[in-house]
Image (spheres, grey):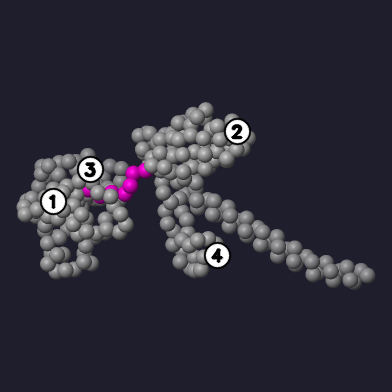
């Protein structure tokens, strides 16, 4: 009888250990996923079983809340606290009966967690869903010697030539060999790049046709630049556009 019990235990223990190990690994995986969401990262694919997801290792950035965004807060167990808030210029939102909370630059999952924490002392079950209702769409600016200067929605992947076509093309006075691409790279500095659109058009070499980023500005001058620095203070951008540094 003792022999039978020992055999049974020898078979049962490895099974229990394997199950405990698998459970521990699953728990660690869930914690890692929650941590990545807080930092605004998510893997490509539809879920853990997506084919090749681990091999690709590609990560997409989640949306980060910006000033002037409008957010809808829906509480699962306390609907009387449902509210719509707008991110102020200082990056804060005002929560009903819970004070202010800095929301700018947070991902929606991270902001959701902070809102639930803010209401923890008020609600026993503060589960909330945060939905982005209004936000600034990606855009680019075209100014200078173009047919229709202005601000345009950046829909999908767009190159400089395509952007110029959307803005009405070049005028007869345009210096197409020195089109300037302004791209903000930090809080106080903007990167500048001279692009010879004339050569790109004549050579039909689309490999040099740069792809735009949200917020890029294209400036088509009338005369030739004598000198332009690669990085300029954002506050000095107006001087370049007015011709003070041409």
Question: Is residue 230 among what the camera can see?
Answer: no
Few, some or many residues within 10 Å of mark 2 (<14, 14–19, 20+)? some
Question: Which residue is labeled 2 in the image?
Answer: 123
| The one of 47 and 210 positioned closer to us in this rendering | 47
Discs 1/2, front: 1
Question: Is residue 72 among what the camera can see?
Answer: yes
Question: Which residue is labeled 4 in the image?
Answer: 49
Secondary structure at numbered mark 4: loop
Q: CA distance from mark 3 to mark 4?
A: 47 Å
Disc on the earlier residue, 3 or 1: 1
Count of all numbered marks drawn on residues in the image? 4
Disc on the earlier residue, 2 or 3: 2
**Residue 135 x, y percent position in the rendering:** 37, 43
Residues at marks 4 and 1 touching, judged by CB atoms closer than 8 Å: no
**Residue 193 x, y percent position in the rendering:** 20, 54
**Residue 199 x, y percent position in the rendering:** 13, 64
Residues at marks 3 and 1 touching, judged by CB atoms closer than 8 Å: no
Discs 3/4, front: 4
Residue drawn at x 6%, y 52% as measured from the top left: 173
| The one of 70 and 200 positioned closer to us in this rendering | 70
Residue drawn at x 50%, y 61% as measured from the top left: 46
Report the disc number at residue 233. 3
Discs 3/1, front: 1
Specify the segment rendered in magenta: 135-141
Disc on the earlier residue, 1 or 2: 2
98 is higher (above) or lower (below) than 157: above
Secondary structure at numbered mark 1: loop
Say whether residue 225 is magenta. no
Secondary structure at numbered mark 2: loop
Question: Which residue is labeled 1 in the image?
Answer: 147
């Amino acid at each position: 009888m003792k022999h039978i019990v020992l055999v049974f235990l020898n078979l049962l223990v490895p099974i229990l250990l394997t199950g405990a190990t698998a459970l521990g690994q699953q728990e660690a995986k869930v914690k890692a996923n929650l941590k990545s969401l807080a930092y605004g990262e998510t893997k490509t694919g539809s879920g853990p079983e997506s084919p090749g997801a681990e091999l690709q290792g590609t990560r997409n950035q989640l949306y980060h809340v910006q000033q002037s965004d409008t957010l809808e807060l829906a509480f699962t167990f306390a609907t009387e606290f449902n509210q719509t808030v707008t991110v102020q210029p200082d990056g804060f939102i005002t929560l009903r009966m819970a004070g202010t909370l800095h929301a700018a630059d947070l991902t929606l999952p991270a902001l959701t967690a902070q809102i639930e924490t803010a209401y923890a002392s008020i609600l026993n079950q503060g589960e909330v869903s945060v939905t982005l209702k209004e936000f600034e769409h990606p855009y680019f600016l075209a100014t200078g010697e173009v047919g229709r200067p202005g601000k345009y929605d950046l829909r999908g992947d767009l190159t400089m030539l395509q952007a110029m076509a959307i803005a009405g093309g070049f005028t007869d006075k345009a210096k197409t060999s020195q089109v300037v691409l302004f791209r903000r790279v930090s809080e106080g500095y903007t990167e500048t790049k001279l692009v010879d659109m004339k050569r790109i058009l004549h050579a039909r070499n689309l490999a040099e046709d740069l792809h735009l980023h949200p917020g890029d500005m294209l400036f088509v001058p009338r005369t030739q630049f004598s000198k332009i620095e690669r990085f300029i203070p954002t506050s000095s951008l107006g001087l370049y556009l007015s011709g003070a540094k041409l």
